Amino acid sequence: MSNEALWILLLLINFGAILLIYRLYGKTGLFVWIPIATILANIQVIKVINLFGFQATLGNIVYATTFLATDILSENHGKKEAAQAVFIGFFSLIVMTIIMNLVILFEPAPDDFAQESLKTIFSLMPRLALASFTAFAFSQFHDVWSFHAWKKRLPATRHLWIRNNASTMISQLIDTGIFISIAFIGVFPWPVLMGLFWTTYLLKFVVALLDTPLLYLAKFYHAKRA
């Protein structure tokens, strides 16, 4: 199966998972999804692939769903709940980084086969965590603020797609710029770095456009539950 086909499959799985967990558990489900997505994205981003003729990092889909989750929380449950979800994401990332870096300090047994693989992935985590934490903080709080700013300017019962996309597109641009700068400057040459920046943002942009119907479905589920 090609990378492009796998990417589309991964997109559908992520969309289906976030929609299912919200339908089953409401806002609690999104509070669970945020740390899942944050941790998975920071592991996947280490892998660079060729996709649609460009080099790109993985993790873009699952990370983009965190913006969808906070937008659903903002729309259906309020600004306070969305901000709480952002803090949960911070906490999960910090705890994962600390615990996994302690894990790789343990002396492995002679028959161990996982140590070097764990070191390859998680020894990068402090820098990736700093990049992700900083990017997550600025972009997610901007997304929550921007979503509610648009909600005040436009009728609350209309233009949901504008609130979703206008807040998310700028927030993801902020996120991508901060993350790529902190995580990969000095790791990749500048031409590769700029390529990763634009392809990463473009993929997030596409995911944000495609997830708009899910926001309407989540609003329908919330109204039906109420």
Image (cartoon, rainbow, N blue to C red):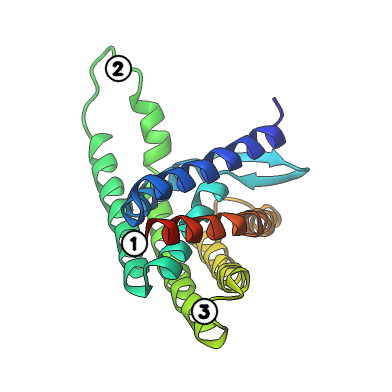
Q: Give residue 55's quadrant in the image.
A: top right
- The image shows a total of numbered marks equal to 3
List the single residue furthest toward the right. 53
Q: Quadrant of the N terminus?
A: top right
Tell me: residue 109, above or below residue 206.
above
| Left or right, 185 with reference to 77 | right
List the single residue furthest toward the top. 111
Q: Name which residue type carries label 1.
A: Ala
Q: Nearer the viewer, residue 36 or 136?
A: 36
Q: Name which residue type carries label 2.
A: Asp
Mark 2 vs mark 1: which is more N-terminal? 1
Residue that mark 3 sits on: 156
The CA span between labels 3 and 1 is: 22 Å
Q: Which mark is residue 35?
A: none
Tell me: residue 131, above or below residue 18.
below
Q: Residue at x 47, y 79 (%)?
A: 148
Residue that mark 2 sits on: 112
Q: Nearer the viewer, residue 65 or 190?
A: 65
Mark 3 vs mark 1: which is more N-terminal? 1
Q: Name which residue type carries label 3.
A: Ala
Residue that mark 1 sits on: 85
Local secondary structure at mark 1: helix
In the image, which is nearer the foreground, mark 3 or mark 1? 3
- Within 10 Å of disc 1 (Cα), the crowding (few <14, some 14-19, many 20+) is many
